[in-house]
Every structure is written in C-alpha cells, then in structure tokens.
Amino acid sequence: MSNIHVKFSLPFHARMAAISSNIMSDTSTVLQNPLVEVNNLAFSRGEKVIYDDISLTIPKGKVTAIMGPSGIGKTTLLKLIGAQLTPDKGEVLFDGQNMHTLSRTELYQVRKRMSMLFQSGALFTDMNVFDNVAFALREHSGLPETIIRSIVLMKLQAVGLRGAAFMMPSELSGGMQRRAALARAIALEPEMVLYDEPFAGQDPISMGMLVKLIRELSDSLKLTSVVVSHDVKEVLGIADYVYVIADKKVIAKGTPEQLRASDNPQLLQFIQGAPDGPVPFHYPAADYQQELLSESN
Amino acid sequence: MNPINLITAIGRYAIELVGSYGKAGLMLWRAIAHIPRPKKGLPLVIKQMYVLGVRSMVIILVSGLFIGMVLALQGYNILVDFGTEDSLGPMVALSLLRELGPVVTALLFAGRAGSALTAEIGLMKSTEQLSSLEMMAIDPLRQIIAPRFWAGVISMPLLAMMFSLVGIFGGHLVGVEWKGIDTGAFWSILQASIEWREDIVNCLIKSTVFGVVVTWIALYRGYEVQPNPEGISRATTSTVVQASLAVLALDFLLTALMFGN
C-alpha cells in the first residue's frame, strides 16, 4: 500500500514510468517459472464462443487469480486446464506436458499432481468427512490405514475441522463443507490447487477463514494456487498475480498493485463495482420510448 | 410445416438417436471393460446390491404374493368349471416363471431402483462429484457406474426368482388353504410340469437380459443428465418410461425365441 501512496504523490508522467517499470520487473520475476501455460486457447459451446484466443501463464508456487464478471466461463477455464474439457484450438501445458494430447493413463498421472476445489464443495454425500478426505489417499497412496488416519487428521486440523471428522457432509454448514473439501483437495499434497469460486456465497467469517487458508496453504506447502473468483477485495488481498478476463479475452493482467493503478475503464468498473460503464447496466434492447409507445401496447 | 424443415427435423432426431445409442454403448464399454480388481471392486458391488437389490425386496415380495394370489383365484374360477382345478399349481407356476416373474420384477425394478439410480447419478453430476473424481484421477465410470451395473445385473434374476417363489406360495394360499385343492396334488403336479431348462433357465436368461437393459438405461440417463433439477426430474421419468417399454418389447422377442416353436 505504501508503494501506491508514493506513486500517487508523484507527477503523472513519473507515476506512469514508475508503474511501467514496476510491471516489467514484477512480471518478469513473477512469471519466470511457469507451471501452467495456456497458449492461444479457443473454446466454444455449441454456437456460443467462450474464448477466442486466450493465453496466460501460471507461475509456480504463487497465488494466481483469474477474475471476471459472472458467466464468462471462468470455471470452464479451470476445466480446460484440468483437461476435463477439450479446447477447439490452442494448448495447455502443465509442467511442459500438453494436457490434451496425453493418453488417459498419462493424464491421470498428471492429475495426481493437481487438485480442484469445486464451487459446491463436491463432497461425496454418502461418506463422512473423514472418509471423504481419506478417499484419494486410499485409492492412490497404498499407505496403511494407520498412516492414512494420521494424515487425514492433520489435514482436518489444518482447516479446523478435526472435531467434525465423523459428521456427514449434509450436517455441515456451507463454509465448513468448503473447508472439508479443501482438506480433501490437499490430502495427496498436490503441486497445484485450482479453486473454483472459493468465496461465493460465504458469510464474512468463513470468507475470512478461506482467504487465510488459501494464503497460508500456498505459503507453507509451496502450492501453486489458481483462484477463480469475482470477489475483488478478497482476491486482490491474497493474489500474487491477477488476470482479468472479459469479452472472451484477457483485458488486464499484473500484480494487484498494478491493477489498482490501471486507468482501463473496463477494469476500473469491475474493480470498483460500478453499476454502469463500459459494461452497460441495460441488456441490449430496442429504444425504450419507442417500445413503450409501439402498437402492440 | 415446410417439408424441408420436416425432413431436417426427422434427420436431426435420427442422428441424435443413433448418437445417443453410440454414447450409451461407449459408456458401458468403458465402465466394464477392465481387468477386475476384486479387492476394491467387490465391496462396491456388494454395497450396491444392498442398495438396489435388498432395498427393492419389499415391493417385489409383496407384489409377488398378491399377483400369485390373484392369478390363483382367477385360474381356479375357470379351471373348476372343467373339473381340472388340480392343474392350478402348474398354471400359476408356469405363468410366473415364464412371463410374470421376469417382466413384472423388471417393471418394478425400473420404477424402484432404476429411477433411484438415475436420480443418484444425476445428483452426483450436478453437485460435481463426478468431476471431482475425474480430478482425483479416479475414473467415475469405473468407480460409480461399473459397480452399479454389475449389482443391477446380478440382483435382477435373484429378485425375479424370489418374485416367482412368493407368487407360487400365494397361489398355494388361495388354491389349497382357501379353495381346498389337495396339497399333494397341487405340489406334485406343479413339480412334474416344471422343467429345469425350459422354465427355470429361461426365466433366469430373461431376467438377466432385463437387468442389463434396465440398469444400463438408468445409468446412461443419469450420466448424461442436464445438471439441474429440471434435467434430473426429466431423466428420472424417461428412465422409467424407456426401461419399461424396452422390457416389454424385449420380452416379446425373447418369448418368441424361447417358446415360438
């Protein structure tokens, strides 16, 4: 924050120069070591084009946020990265491997190195919290049950739900479900966690908890985190690097400070939550007066 | 309607229909074409046999009892006019084993277990549980679809056999206990007229085929559901309708093959 204050006290040209040099240095250090590279990706559902030509880089060991208005396919992007969906063109490289040309077995090997926190939590409803967290460990790790028990309890302790280990998902509140799902997502110690709208529909307390958990897990486990969200304040608070997507492409990218200092009107409207601006309040329609006075009335 | 549009619509419908058959076939193939893993797979199949089979037993047994009783009562009223009421045993037993056992069990199974399967899988899809399995590098077809398929295929013939047995017992209640047919005559003629290959094996073949079809339709409808409440309710209905029609059509085909000559 102090950095920004300094910048704003400078004359305009000096400020712009400071920002652009900042962009150069930050971008090069942050993006030096990419884990995921999305190159010229295009994807459409039926007739509707979701992405035209989108490229982004997810640096290793950092929290990268992907922001944008609702309904522009942020979740779709995560599913494209996880190769649950196949793009029309372009590629997604995870640690240099093209996710969409791998065989099923190879893809499953790569997926063991990543995990995803779904918006709904996606806990298995027929198992309690403990079994949910233990599930992937039992399937993949081949560890004896006593060790699995210790790992599960440690993961649950990390998200503060050790006391709820034997509750069923339906008995948990929304925030607890998401924390339980987070414990499950980190059970196999993945290199990367994809968070799909982790803050959507959370009360301020559980939102605070999730923000803290995502940042702490990322730092302590050296996790690469990709957070898809439209909660501007929370995201700018924890992200190391941010992409803002709108109109099928990346409209802005940079560190949170760079985005706050930007003068792109589309980005400013999004960050400030202005009801009208480059994204109009009204869905495109015929002239209001004419429609009211038209003959059908 | 413009004839060109009509032809286009028919063509589109046909392409979608063939496409969905292909998809359903692929889903089943990818689910079951694996080297079995008895240690992991067997407990899943047993759990599903409990859910699909054991929990369907009440409706199957009660229906079997009443259908056997009604069959015996109607049969007795006709047979007694000709003085052949001793043949009530084979009449009830053969009707049940050859037709009613497999068919009615399959229809009830489609309503009870098939609709529940579709709703369960559909809900798993709409709450992203299937996607989360995918992301955990676990094949949902293998983990979710395959055990349910095998459980359905194994449960159906067992349920059909129970249905027939209870139905015969119902026939005994009405014929022997109520209408006073001689117990010895009822059971000995029944035993003499049932053949292992012709009746029992055919009953098992029919019910296994119905088990495959009903479970397959239910799983496919759930797996391909539009992931929202409206989609799930539509898929559940179409499971019951399609599975019932498929059972009745296949029953005619199988009966023609088995008893046509």
Image (cartoon, coloured by chain):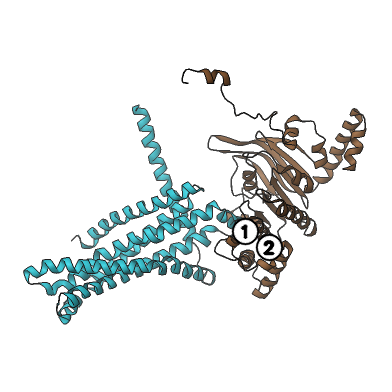
Chain colours: A brown, B cyan
Q: In this rendering, would B9 be left or right of A167?
A: left
* Residue B2 position within the rendered picture, expressed as x and y whole percent measured from the top left: 35, 26
Q: Is residue B202 above or below residue A206?
A: below
Pick the front one: A160 or A27: A160
* Residue B31 position within the rendered picture, expressed as x and y whole percent measured from the top left: 48, 59
Question: Would you identify the image quadrant in which residue B260 lies?
Answer: bottom left
The local crowd at label 1, few if under 14, some if 14 to 19, many if 20 or more residues have their Cα within 10 Å, is many
Return the mark for residue A188: 2
The local crowd at label 2, few if under 14, some if 14 to 19, many if 20 or more residues have their Cα within 10 Å, is many
| Chain for numbered disc 1 | B
Instruction: Describe the element under mark 1 as helix, strand or loop.
Output: loop
Q: Is residue A221 visible?
A: yes
Q: Which residue is the site of mark 1?
A: B136
Q: Quadrant of the N terminus of chain A?
A: top right
Q: Is residue A157 above or below residue A293?
A: below
Q: Is residue A287 visible?
A: no
CB under 8 Å between callouts 2 and 1? yes
* Residue B34 position within the rendered picture, expressed as x and y whole percent measured from the top left: 50, 63
Q: Amino acid at mark 1?
A: Met
How many badges with numbers are in the image? Answer: 2
Picture residue at 72% right of the left edge, 33% below the top: A274
Of all residues, the one furthest to the bottom in this rendering is B184
| Chain for numbered disc 2 | A
Pick the front one: A240 or A71: A71
Disc 2 and disc 1 on one polypeptide chain: no
Question: Would you identify the image quadrant in which residue A220 lies?
Answer: bottom right
